[in-house]
Amino acid sequence: MNRNETAVALALLISCTLLLHGKVRAADVTVNLNTTYQTIDGFGGMQDRGWTGYNLLPADHNTLFSNGPNQLGFSILRIRINENKNFWSIDLPDAKEAASRGIKVFATSWSAPTNLRVASGSSYKVDPSKYQGYVDHLNGFAKHMKDNGVNLYALGFQNEPDWCGEWSCGSTTEMYNFAKNWGPKLRTNGIKVITAESFNFNKGYYDPILNDATALANVDILGTHFYGTSKKSSDATFDYTLFKQKGGTKPFWMTEVYTEDVNNKGSNTWPLCLDVAYEMHRALALSNMSAYVWWYLKRNYGPLHITANNTSAAASAGTISKVGALMGQYSKYVRPGAIRVDATRKVQSDVYTSAFKKADSVVLVVVNMASAAKTVSFSIPNLKSTSGLKIVTSGTKSLADAGTVAVSSGNFSATLDAQSTTTFIFSGNATPVINHTPGSIMSVRPEGVYRIFELSGRMIGEVSVTRESTVNAAVRKTFPNATGLYLARSLDGSSCVNITIQP
């Protein structure tokens, strides 16, 4: 190999091992990939045949829980723990289908069986002297689901204790005591325990738990609802300082909501539905929440739209509504396991950004609440992508492919449609890790897909390395005429090797 070839090879090898440090210019939005917050568990919704009168159809399952074109990529399903065990099986078809797809299925109790209740004001609550019986009831439901093929991911012991009259009540003190003293008894078969889920994000249900290390250790997820909030609510409503100070790594889930008036006007009413994206933004970027779960999945106000809320209309597959498309701007691209990273949250007027990373991908979701288009500049230091995908939902678009944005040293600019949500997806950004020794590598066996480069820097193609093969062998098989020195970089950027193919 001559001196020039050596220099080129060295340069390529260095490029496999170092981050590209681009110039950072003043921008409306700056993303810091090194400052991290919560891990995302997913997005989804509620299904309950006991109240709706119907189960989901196979086509609905595909639309909701798969992640291809015209699908939403939801990863969470919520069901109800009926107080009457004779009705425990009515949601099994949906729960089993979801579980078979790897979806997180969790269940919440609204009321205890009648023999476990005691009067409370004008309503009732779980009799504190019968808490063991109530735990047995909840664990019985979990066992029933497991025996029928559904391992619940989590279990909530009380839905909306602060909404008395329709189901069990519970004071902040009672719910704190139950969480602290009885929460661990619900962790059967590894099930996670969710706190009581307040109707309107009443922090009084969470403050005592956060201030008590034992109580906090005895629950796994804090759960709440966003009823009573709206786009007019202040940021302080969502910015929960105590949770950020003492919550540690506990996930906080928004487990039920429909946004203001959408239940009356429907899930395709524009721009009313845009409130969904704004609320999701504040849940993730202000409340540090890890999940966002809509009320009924298939409804005239749900992510799957039907013309009426009855079994006749539900006999046909639902169609993705504007609510569904706006949720999909997150759920399809901000996948479970993604980590939220720091980003300038509010830019210009009515423009809001949140950012996430997972493996070699970086995802930005930008909500423009303004009635005019906005041009926004972005800076993502150390971003390696030279282009990114742009997906848009607006009054005239639904999860529409809007082309690509060109990136230079982590900087780009984009125009946001009026009253829209835009998702930008950038790939190939994993931090490289050297996984080589000097000279030829004839027996490297890291599994996965590798891109193969000539010394000139031209990529000649990709190879797939299996457990039974090596990078060298895969290159020989795929490119039988290749000889000399090549560089192989894993698709996720986690390893880079130089290989020599002898003639």
Image: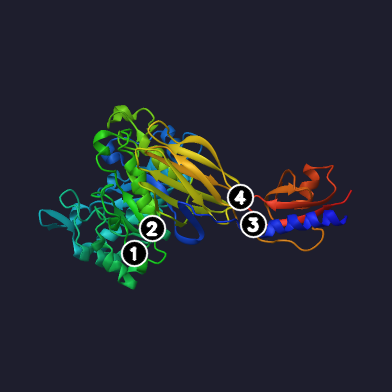
Say which amino acid is labelled 4: Gly
**Among numbered discs 4 and 3, the one appearing first in the sequence:** 4
Label 2 to label 4: alpha-carbon separation: 26 Å
- Secondary structure of the residue carrying tag 3 is loop
Question: Disc 2 and disc 3: Cα gap in Å?
Answer: 28 Å
Amino acid identity at mark 3: Ser
Q: Amino acid at mark 1?
A: Phe
Kindly check if marks 2 and 4 are in contact, taking CB atoms under 8 A apart as contact: no
In terms of depth relative to the viewer, which is nearer, 492 or 116?
492
Q: Which residue is mark 4?
A: 428
In the image shown, does 9 or 324 lie closer to the viewer? 9
In the image: residue 187, left or right of residue 401? left
The residue singled out by tag 1 in the image is 243
Report, in whole angstroms, how far the alpha carbon at label 1 lies from the one at label 2: 9 Å
Q: Earlier in the sequence, mark 2 or mark 3?
A: 2
Q: Which residue is mark 3?
A: 494
Secondary structure of residue under mark 2: loop
Q: Which residue is mark 2?
A: 288
Q: Position of residue 211 (x, y in %)?
A: 30, 71
Q: Quadrant of residue 417?
A: top left
Contact (Cβ within 8 Å) of mark 1 with mark 2: yes
Horizontal side of 438 relative to 359 (left or right) equals right
Which mark sits nearer the N-terminus, 1 or 4? Answer: 1
- Disc 2 to disc 3: CB gap under 8 Å: no
Q: Nearer the viewer, residue 156 or 459?
A: 459
